[in-house]
Image (cartoon, rainbow, N blue to C red):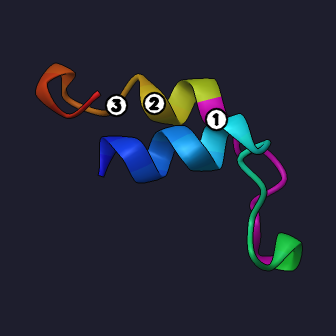
Amino acid sequence: MREIRGYWVARGAKWDDPRLKPKDWDLLKQVTHIPAEWR
């Protein structure tokens, strides 16, 4: 999972369908909710 997430973030963390992305979505806020053992 870390490798997939790292690849996704390295490529800009783009959504497959940008229309589904909430307007206030923030990548940095989201990753702070990932438990340390999964980062």
Q: Are marks 2 and 1 in contact (CB under 8 Å)?
A: yes
Answer whether labels 3 and 2 touch (C-beta < 8 Å).
yes
Residue at point 74%, 65% (across, down) = 15
- Between 9 and 24, the residue placed more toward the observer is 9
Which mark, residue 33?
Answer: 3
**Per the image, is 26 magenta?**
yes
What secondary structure is found at the residue carrying circle 2?
helix
Instruction: Check the picture and name the quadrant holding the C terminus.
Output: top left
x%, y% of residue 29? 55, 27
Mark 1 neighbour class, 10 Å CA radius: few under 14, some 14 to 19, many 20 or more: few
Q: Tell me which segment is drawn in magenta.
A: 20-27
- In three-dimensional space, the C-alpha distance between marks 3 and 2, rounded to whole angstroms, equals 5 Å
Percent x, y of residue 14: 78, 56
Q: CA distance from mark 2 to mark 1?
A: 6 Å
Looking at the picture, tell me which residue is in the foreground, 26 or 8.
8
Residue most extreme to the left: 37
Three-letter amino acid code at the position of disc 1: Leu
Predominant SS of the magenta segment: loop
Badge 3 density bin: few <14, some 14–19, many ≥20, Cα 10 Å: few
Q: Position of residue 21 (x, y in %)?
A: 76, 64
Residue picked out by circle 1:
27
Residue under pointer 2: 31
Please tell me whether residue 7 belongs to the stretch shown in magenta: no
Task: For label 2, count other residues whose C-alpha is less than 10 Å away and answer few (under 14), some (14-19) or many (20+).
Answer: few
